[in-house]
Amino acid sequence: MIFLLSALAVTASGYALLRATRLTVRPAVDAPLSWLVGAAWLGWASFVARGLLGIPSGPVTAGAVLLLPFAGWAASHRLRTRSASPETAGEGPPPPPRWIPRPAWLFVPMTAWTVLVAAAVVLHGLGTPIHTDDSYRVRAYAPVLAATGDWSDPARAVVAMAGPVPTYLPALAWTLGAEVDPIHVSATVILTFLALLALLVCLGSARGVPEAGWGGAFALTSMPLFAYHATSTYADGWLACYLAAAFAFLVAHGRGGSPGDAARTLLLLLGAAMVKREGELVALPVAAALLAQVAWREPAGKGKWLRLAPILGAWAALFLARLVAFGSGNSVPFLLAAGQKMAGGAPAAAAAAAPSAGGLGPGVLFLQALFTEGNLGLLWWVFVPSVLLLVPRIRGERQGLSLAALAVLLAQAAASAIWLYPEFTLNHTTVHRSLLPVSAAAAVWLAALLAPPAPPAAAARGSGKRPPRRRGG
Amino acid sequence: MLLAAAPLERARELPIPVLESQLASSVASRRVADGIALPVQGETGLVIPLPGVEALEIQYRSTGTLQITWTTTTVDHAPAPFETPWHHERVPPGRGRLVFDLRTTPHWRADRLPYFLLEGSGEFTVTGVRVRLATGDPATDTRSFDEAIRWSPIRLDHATVNRLGPPVWTASRGVLLLLVLGIAFLVGAVGGALAWLGFRKRWRPAPFLAVAGVACALAADGVFLVRAWPMLAFPPRLAAEDRLANDFALGPELGELTALARRSLRPGDRVGVQAKEPDWFAWETICFHLAPRPCVKVVPGATTYEGLSGVKHLTPGELDAVVYLHAGVPLLPGFGPAESLGPEAFVARRR
């Protein structure tokens, strides 16, 4: 019961934050978005309080963290009443929502599969005791340490590996008095997975393109390893959820140039940056693409940067807190490893990086992981020809920068798998997992590309009209 | 999935006296009125030297919760029961029937011998065995093997979180399912778009990419659903102890003992774990699921014991309880069993 109440509190806190920053969309979109944003806020505020300001974790800190967004909402409401500005600033009138994707013969099986996977994730995830070594030592252990207020050197090392969101979100119920039941860790990952699916479906429908939303949800649930990770406590699925949610808004921003979508993207990327140690590395190139998109797409004026400045400030505070809490070595381990590698001191044993007994090197195994291993389903088979055949559409919908961000993410995964840590590719331990975030983001991007065009905001309200045809496919 | 539920077709009975004369086990078996009884304390290995078997059905009676692992072996090789894919199943106490498809085990050939590993505490009595032999016709056996691998169940193991294992289309020729579906997608999408261009003089690849992608993805999803179904744990259980006792797939006895320890230990107890070395995460499993109680791994002879990730440290004198699981060494002095699943699986308290 305390867990359910704490989940509701996180969602309410996230909603208050969205209202305070005027980033609400529509109630159906706001509900899942509030969970994602609330979790990011809880992770950020708890970690910055502990790591940077030295405020111990506990029920008082957790309560204050959950209530702060409400204070912000009240203050923002007061200011807005005075200035009489619109509720969702910087955005034109939204297009009419459309809830049923077309054609039915294609989307009925897709929807059925999505619902089936979501149900299986809930049932299996809540029925399976945590059983993996990494969860015991890091992923599911960090929340226990947070709940008990342990901030010793070894405890900090565990939190550094897990990241603030996977540490503080599952710990909330325990901090507020619930009995420590490890299934709460799984439950928070499951809720994040369901929130992502709901967000995609509702955002697509709210923007008049339910095909993009259901298509994205179907593409995600057709990646077997991603669905499985949603039932585990591993943070790769968590990172993938935040990144995919951020891409939904990044794509929308590319199309419409709405300042609100830019801020939502950056907020969700901040959430991604707080998952695992590599979260920041994964989120950064996407944030760079977003900022380039903001500079390119939105009309000139300092207002467009003002909205993003607090989130960028939060990102800087997060990095500072990391440095103070963990030291430079644990804050940017992958950059250090890359530096060592370039300097000639390989982080991995040279012998371990030799081709496997079957003669396949890490490069071939990486390609197999993308295309034939089956962990990611058919995604990359569809993605590659779609990019090649739909170049005019990518240009027309201004998705070049989001595609570039995907390319950088894929290059990061390839560099890690082939060059930096080839031994983990040869023994199949991390290569498939490390592809989950970029694959989830690619699934959302691809679904948006293959869906019919979004109706313009000023289009006629009759939602039964056929969408206009697009050039190039 | 269907094989596990349905009676084994085309199987013939293996009489118990015949089985008794052939059976080779790591512990002494004994003949009882209705079958062959095997004591299980920790691990009991079992070879049925009957080549040519592709599937078996065993009727059994068990006095404890056990785990059975099945694979195949040869006379001149030590069995490797945990080799990927690791096929294992929980054996609840009481009577039951188990069906084993040996074709999906690693390196299966018709001339290999069925091997079983029983783990836990109790007695496992084989009351009946039916076997299905390979036909001996290469074409039929190859078809049968390909079909078995195509639909082989995914089972939860320690590395599932890293990789689910590639779905296979034709195992005998090494063709992967995703290669077949990927090529089918390319033919459908590009062929459809080109045909549309030819007939309608319009270049519209997006609908063909989408429809071909969805169709092929659904085919892959269907195969995944069939293969993953046996792995899924339904329904959810509210109490952590119930989940551990019933759904801890990687070691049913370990799950049951952890549940017992969770139930019987007080919140403030400081716990040590004695488990077999090396073992797959036995002490980590127990310590993690007992958190936030301070919990450490007991290392014989050490003056200080360390917990998960080196966060907790306790001396032998600070321990209130010990959880013991087939450790192979004596229980720490000063402790005595308080609640037990068996003589080598128990929770001990300071005397």
Image (cartoon, coloured by chain):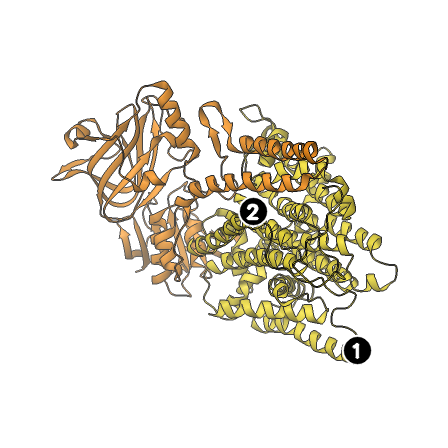
Chain colours: A yellow, B orange
Q: Residue furthest left?
A: B33
Residue visible at 37% across and 34% down? B81
A112 to B187, vertically: above or below: below
Query: Mark 1 belongs to which amino acid?
Result: Ala
Earlier-in-chain disc, 2 versus 1: 1
Q: Is residue B14 left or right of residue A348?
A: left
Q: Amino acid at mark 2?
A: Leu
- Label 1 resides on the chain identified as A
Whole-percent x, y for residue A151 in the image: 59, 61
Q: Considering the numbered disc 2 on the image, is that residue within a helix, a strand or a loop?
A: helix
- Residue B62 quadrant: top left
Which is in the foreground here, disc 2 or disc 1? 2
* Side of B306 relative to B31 (left or right): right
Identify which residue is drawn at 79% across, 62% down: A309
Q: Which mark is drawn over residue A106?
A: 2
* Residue receiving disc 1: A84
> Which residue is pictured at 44% across the width and 33% down the height?
B150
Lateral position of residue A196 relative to residue A90, left or right: left
Q: Residues within 10 Å of mark 2 (few under 14, many from 20)?
A: some
Q: Nearer the viewer, residue B298 or B235?
A: B235
Left-right relation of A435 to B105: right
Residue A272 in sight in this render: yes
Residue at point 75% right, 80% down? A78
Crowding near pointer 1: few (<14 within 10 Å), some, many (20+)?
Answer: few
